[in-house]
Amino acid sequence: MTAPARAHVVGAGLAGLAAAVRLADAGIAVTLYESAQHAGGRCRSYFDATLGCRIDNGNHLLMQGNGAAMAYLAAIGAGDTLTGPEEADYPFLDLATGERWVLRPGRGRLPWWLFDRGRRVPGTSLRDYLAAARLALAQPADTVAAVLDPQSVMYRRFWRPLTVAALNTRAREASALLLGRVLRESFGRGGAACRPLMPKIGLSESLIEPALAHLRQRGAEIRFVARLRGIEIADGRIAALGFEAGGEPVAAGEMVVLAVPAPVAVRLVRGLDAPDQFRAIVNAHYRISIGDDAPFFVGLIGGTAEWVFRKREVLSVTVSAADRLIDQPAEELSLRLWRDVEQAYGLTPQKMPPAQIVKERRATFAATPAELARRPKQRTRWPNLALAGDWTDTGLPATIEGAIRSGFAAADEVLAVKTT
Ligand SMILES: Cc1cc2nc3c(=O)[nH]c(=O)nc-3n(C[C@H](O)[C@H](O)[C@H](O)COP(=O)(O)OP(=O)(O)OC[C@H]3O[C@@H](n4cnc5c(N)ncnc54)[C@H](O)[C@@H]3O)c2cc1C
């Protein structure tokens, strides 16, 4: 009995990269195929000619407690490429009232900080936080809005923005069970696990390029502009992969990890059920640098912008579950969001700097109870095919952590298969 001779990993987003890294590190020969000319999928950086600088396709926030992401960064030698506040500080501004506060959970697991009024969301009481227990008891069909009180200050200032940010789905339709899971993995593990982190330079510089370099160092073959068109099945196993440029046999003892987006996977794999409803994210990037002493980001309540991030060369806005904005003209959107940016960072009203709007129509699958029920496991009915991707059944929303966890889990499936 030996480990598989080779793994064919299709898709070089974070899920595929994580699978490839784990397999290469286990001594398996890896071929990685990617349809685009670059890796990273929905999580990458590129040069934007309008702004004259590199930007991320979207602002991505990690947390110190994202165990799989931290293990991946350590494996590719990029553990020191993230930055963020020393503590789990989440500054907010309510645009309707002008109130500012910093949500600051204590470092430990026990939430003593909740007894300190100054650390809670203004206008909320200890009882509002105990409502989190209702998420723990939620049933699979429950939405966040059905379980929590949509009329409360806590809902407007905490539960609703948290749900949209973490699940990219409006609270009225988002799964309460999944939000409960997110809470357990973040606040439930104490403030240290909630420390927000983001790349010092860009997503690709932290999460993508070091992974490609690591894979090349391990002898992996990386093929770009290699779009998988079909999968050939013979004798109950994957026998060949059909690319635009030609077929690639999958020899006995070889394995396939399919790490493509859900709509592509269902076209390729007969009988596969997967989420088919998606939600958009809109990002606006403004070419302006402000002082290093300004917060890394500000959460906004009651605006169109939901988060504003301070990057090296830009201020960047995120609007999640942004389907209502997706067809709005970019010029209109950039002007509208700029007003929120000025307020977030207390800038004196000024002419809008050069701006770029990036719309990701299918940013993530919709984290509704119905869609969650459609997430498949890594293992498939074919013994040499495993699935990866943020849409698979990771127990997490579609996130960096979920994508990487799925890639690791798919690699573990491959490593568990012993060929004779
Ligand atoms: C704007 C935006 C903001 C986000 N913000 C956050 C955040 O703050 N925090 C967070 O944790 N997550 C965030 N996410 C989610 C995160 O980016 C994704 O969950 C993650 O990148 C998904 O990785 P993946 O590998 O599963 O999928 P993908 O990145 O979609 O990778 C799939 C890859 O497969 C390739 N491919 C497709 N078809 C084929 C084919 N036929 N043959 C070969 N290759 C193919 C694609 O080109 C792609 O590279 C955000 C996403 C977006 C879009």
Image: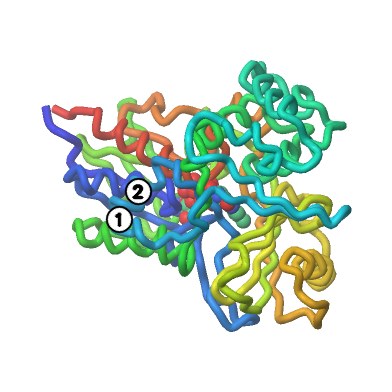
Which secondary structure, mark 2? helix
Q: Label 2 is placed on what type of residue?
A: Tyr
Query: In x, y percent, where is residue 62?
Result: 50, 50
Q: Report how far apart the C-alphas of labels 1 and 2 lie in the structure.
A: 6 Å
Which secondary structure, mark 1? loop
Q: Which residue sits at x=33%, y=40%?
A: 256
Q: Residues within 10 Å of mark 1 (few under 14, many from 20)?
A: many
Task: Please tell me whether residue 102 is drawn above or below residue 392 in the rendered image.
Answer: below
Which of these two is toward me, 85 or 28?
A: 85
Cβ atoms under marks 1 and 2 closer than 8 Å: yes
Task: Please tell me whether residue 330 is drawn above or below residue 12 in the rendered image.
Answer: below
Residue 81 visible in the displayed image: yes
Q: Which residue sits at x=56%, y=41%?
A: 398
In this image, 363 relative to 224: left or right?
A: right
Residue 392 visible in the displayed image: no
Find disc 2 in the rendering and name its residue: 72
Find disc 1 in the rendering and name its residue: 76
In this image, 97 relative to 42: left or right?
A: right
Task: Please tell me whether residue 312 is drawn above or below residue 125 in the rendered image.
Answer: below
Query: In x, y percent, where is residue 315?
Result: 65, 70
